């Protein structure tokens, strides 16, 4: 019977079967050992893996980690907030410089044109008034800096994401998934994050070849070359042939033909039976 | 639910672009389901369940950009979780060099009027299924797990895995044949069934 695949069984188990369905299933079930087995095994798994107390917190933790790993910071609000802040600092600093400079000039002109007053209060003694004024202003808190400002006008730090506690292996897999899923930007970001967070890990080392390839495809040949070089400099490994091939492609993109030839010869000599050797030989013929 | 009618379609699209709020919303909605999926495949409460689910969630969000919408976002999330959990099972078995019984030490406690014998039979049968899932080709194991563990129909499996229904039929047929054989070869299950006159061995 074709329905052994579970359509009828599914309706019966989910409680949406009609009376006709139930009659048909009863008749079928009695004669079909496959469906009896299926029903028993399905029943065995019903109670397994149910929700547990604390699952809400677990999911919240996972959510925070994923956002920290894959989420892009909300750029617009940060830019809008930082912009006026920097402008205000710059304006205040400029005003301070202008005042200090004016006072400095005024003092010198006074010295030149008239005798010093008996109880002259020192105005500005520093030979570097600009530095002093800026330091004072930057030491001031933002609340003091913005007169009459309210909380909304005070620039805030970008929302601090929960620090990622994702393992190197998980990051590597996520980056690889992004690369295979056709999301090179996300892949590059994840590989870079992996190398920053776990610089000594095996995954970070292997990621240099993957990241090099992704950078190469995105047109960043120099950055790609640095990745391949770093992998080879670390002693190479199972991906040495790939790294050499990627390095040759990067050098080609950069127009460094002499080094490309040298690299291709090394690849052919070291891995003559690899799939890359064929391409390398063809390219060497083109170059000669 | 096809993606065209899927209420999560829009938020999934934003999440694929890295929108933190969309990612958060999607994980909060589907993370519980993914955790339960992993837990079920790992055989119940497991010390690595959260880590495996974490990896699955990362993979799920990363893969959204390539998601074609052949199934609902929820089905897609379950597929990713299932795949990661099956992979983890095989990894744990190699890493820890444990047998079926150690890996699948029963975590399922039945309450109410289920007899200890029924519980033992269910436990043994699950162990046989788990052992088979670890050995079958990935594609067959996925189809079998979706069918037996989550009650998916052939149509649902085809939609979730993005393969024709006939392919699913074929995989299920192979999987069921293998399962029937494995159940028949289980001595422990045989011993248990001998003590239960209401049942007879499946062969």
Image (cartoon, grey):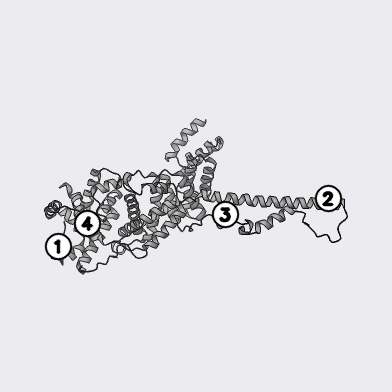
Label number found at residue A109: 2
Q: Which residue is mark 1?
A: B199
Label number found at residue B182: 4
Label 1 to label 4, Cα distance in Å? Answer: 17 Å
**Circles 1 and 3: CB distance less than 8 Å?**
no
Which is in the foreground here, disc 2 or disc 1? 2
Residue A288 x/y as whole percent? 52, 30
| Image-quadrant location for residue B129 | bottom left
Q: Is residue B125 above or below residue A181?
A: below
Q: Which residue is mark 3?
A: A153
Q: Is residue A213 above or below residue A106?
A: above
Residue A3 x/y as whole percent? 17, 48
Element type at marker 3? Answer: helix
Residues B141 and A48: in front is A48
Instruction: Write the residue at 36% across / 45% down.
Output: B67
Residue A210, visible in the rendered structure: no
Instruction: Write the residue at 56% across / 57% down.
Output: A151
Image-based side of B192 in relation to B21, left or right: left
Element type at marker 1? Answer: loop
Label 2 crowd bin: few (<14), some (14–19), many (20+), radius 10 Å: few
The numbered mark, 3 or 2, whose residue comes first in the sequence reads 2
Which is in the foreground here, disc 1 or disc 4? 1
């Amino acid at each position: 019977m074709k329905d052994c695949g579970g359509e009828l069984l599914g309706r019966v188990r989910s409680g949406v079967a009609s009376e006709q369905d139930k009659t048909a299933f009863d008749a079928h079930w009695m004669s079909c050992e496959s469906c009896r087995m299926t029903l028993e095994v399905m029943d065995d798994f019903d109670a397994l893996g149910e929700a547990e107390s604390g699952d809400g917190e677990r999911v919240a933790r996972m959510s925070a980690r994923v956002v920290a790993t894959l989420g892009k910071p909300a750029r617009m609000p940060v830019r809008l907030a930082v912009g006026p802040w920097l402008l205000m600092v710059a304006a205040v600093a400029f005003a301070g410089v202008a005042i200090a400079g004016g006072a400095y000039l005024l003092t010198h002109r006074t010295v030149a044109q008239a005798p010093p007053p008996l109880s002259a209060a020192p105005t500005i003694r520093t030979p570097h008034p600009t530095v002093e004024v800026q330091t004072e202003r930057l030491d001031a808190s933002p609340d003091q800096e913005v007169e009459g400002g309210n909380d909304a006008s005070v620039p805030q730090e970008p929302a601090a994401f929960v620090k990622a506690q994702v393992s190197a292996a998980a990051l590597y897999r996520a980056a690889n998934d992004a690369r295979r899923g056709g999301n090179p930007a996300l892949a590059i970001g994840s590989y870079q994050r992996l190398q920053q967070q776990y610089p000594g890990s095996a995954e970070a080392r292997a990621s240099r070849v993957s990241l090099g390839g992704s950078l190469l495809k995105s047109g960043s040949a120099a950055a790609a070359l640095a990745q391949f070089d770093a992998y080879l400099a670390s002693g190479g490994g199972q991906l040495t042939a790939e790294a050499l091939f990627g390095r040759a492609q990067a050098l080609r993109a950069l127009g460094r033909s002499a080094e490309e030839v040298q690299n291709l010869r090394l690849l052919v000599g070291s891995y003559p039976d690899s799939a890359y050797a064929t391409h390398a030989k063809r390219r060497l013929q083109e170059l000669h | 639910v096809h993606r065209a009618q899927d209420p999560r379609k829009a938020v999934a699209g934003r999440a694929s672009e890295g929108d933190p709020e969309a990612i958060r919303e999607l994980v909060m909605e589907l993370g519980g389901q993914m955790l339960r999926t992993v837990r079920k495949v790992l055989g119940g409460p497991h010390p690595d369940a959260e880590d495996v689910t974490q990896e699955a969630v990362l993979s799920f969000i990363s893969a959204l950009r390539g998601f074609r919408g052949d199934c609902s976002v929820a089905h897609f999330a379950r597929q990713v979780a299932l795949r990661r959990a099956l992979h983890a099972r095989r990894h744990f078995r190699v890493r820890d060099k444990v047998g079926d019984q150690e890996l699948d030490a029963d975590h399922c406690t039945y309450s109410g009027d289920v007899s200890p014998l029924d519980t033992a039979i269910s436990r043994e049968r699950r162990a046989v299924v788990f052992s088979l899932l670890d050995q079958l080709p990935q594609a067959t194991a996925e189809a079998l797990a979706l069918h037996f563990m989550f009650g998916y129909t052939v149509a649902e499996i085809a939609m979730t895995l993005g393969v024709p229904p006939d392919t699913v039929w074929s995989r299920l047929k192979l999987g069921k044949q293998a399962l029937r054989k494995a159940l028949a070869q289980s001595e422990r299950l045989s011993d248990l069934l001998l003590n239960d006159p209401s049942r007879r061995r499946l062969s």
